[in-house]
Amino acid sequence: MSEPTYILGIESSCDETACSIVANGTDVLSNSIASQIDLHKRFGGVVPELASRAHIEAINNIIAEAIEQAGVAPEKISAVAIANEPGLIGSLLIGLMAAKTIAWIWDVPLVAVNHVYAHAYAASLDEGPIEYPAAALICSGGHTALYRCDSPMDMTLLGGTIDDAAGEAFDKVAKILELSYPGGPVIDRISREGDPKLIDFPRSLLAGDSLDFSFSGLKTAVLYHVNGVPGPRPTRVGKKPGPTARRAAMQENAGRGIENFTQQEIADVAAGFQAAVVDTLKIKLRRAAGKIDVKTLVIGGGVAANSALRAAVTELGDKLGCAVRMPKMAYCVDNAAMTAGLAYHYLQAGQVADLTLAARPTVRI
């Protein structure tokens, strides 16, 4: 039996400092992550300068922790993988310098990985390979995009966000509703207590069969509903619904500021917002699948942890008669296991980088 191919991966594209060792592209032996949520919570979002400084403080300990957990000696590591694009430039550089240093000291290849492509691969971790071709929906705080995937390495962009990413919209709406940061988990949780049909927030599908995304208008609609700023207002679902106590209370308080909303009404707004996001993502994924002889639907990124989205995509897969692959919760957030896992395929194909590899905050299409 041949020796497994062990790859050490490093991820620092935004606000998680992560290191992982993965064998043969799927067997995760360690997955160490230092989160910066508490650091950025008071700002309601990631502050790039603070993020890069925190990476400097955390990265050595995280790498040591991942190596210790995996129990793999450095001389057995076949390559070092780094997510060098896209992301915050200061954050990317910290991980890249660490990866280059380790690759040079251990005299092993350096493998460059696209962070978004790694999210599309995350569903393979601790599981079997994805059946291609696949339509992949990647949605997180910084990215919302659709891809045609013909292999782990062969991905074609079908559509992306023209303003706010889905995860960013969750964070901004959570701030409007005076909920905690990050917004995704808390909105997912309280939406279970709300009525997603009580308020019909807009679904921005753009013109024709567009596969691009826009969530800025939805965020603004929530703001108008809460604070009454002049502009487009969401309509009620159905034709002249009969008066109910909850609907009447919502009508009375809408536009008067979040301090006048009850906890139930906040849950109703959160549920309506989440339903609009999930409907939009599902419709766009269905459109993408219609353009491909698709065998699998794939989701990835932080928003892929959303329970309503996971249920909606599962339902869509059943209707289309295709497989659905979703990452385990640990692999939805930014992590290095997906980086190391995808790097295995690049290494097998002989696609390695050298020590001149640069960090790129954006990717040219």
Image: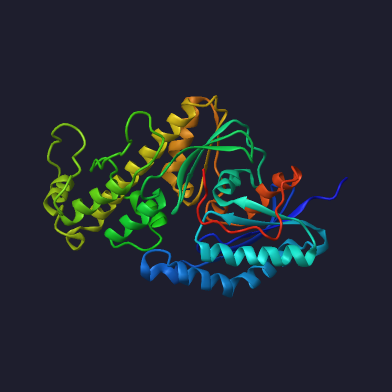
Q: Nearer the viewer, residue 247 or 66?
A: 66
Residue 302 vertical placement versus 68 (above, below)? above
Q: Position of residue 194 (x, y in %)?
A: 29, 48
Q: Position of residue 201 (x, y in %)?
A: 25, 43
Residue 173 vertical placement versus 42 (above, below)? above
Q: Position of residue 18 (x, y in %)?
A: 60, 62
Query: In the picture, residue 12 is in which quadrant?
Result: bottom right
Q: Residue at 47% across / 25% down in the picture?
A: 290
Q: Position of residue 357 (x, y in %)?
A: 65, 58
Q: Residue at 35% across / 52% down in the picture?
A: 169
Snapshot colouring: rainbow
Q: Nearer the viewer, residue 365 or 30?
A: 365
Residue 101 vertical placement versus 215 (above, below)? below
Q: Residue furthest front?
A: 356
Q: Is residue 240 left or right of residue 170?
A: left
Kindly tell me whether residue 32 is visible in this rendering: no
Kindly tell me whether residue 28 is visible in this rendering: yes
Q: Residue at 14% across / 54% down in the picture?
A: 253
Q: Residue at 73% across / 61% down in the picture?
A: 70
The N terminus - image quarter:
top right
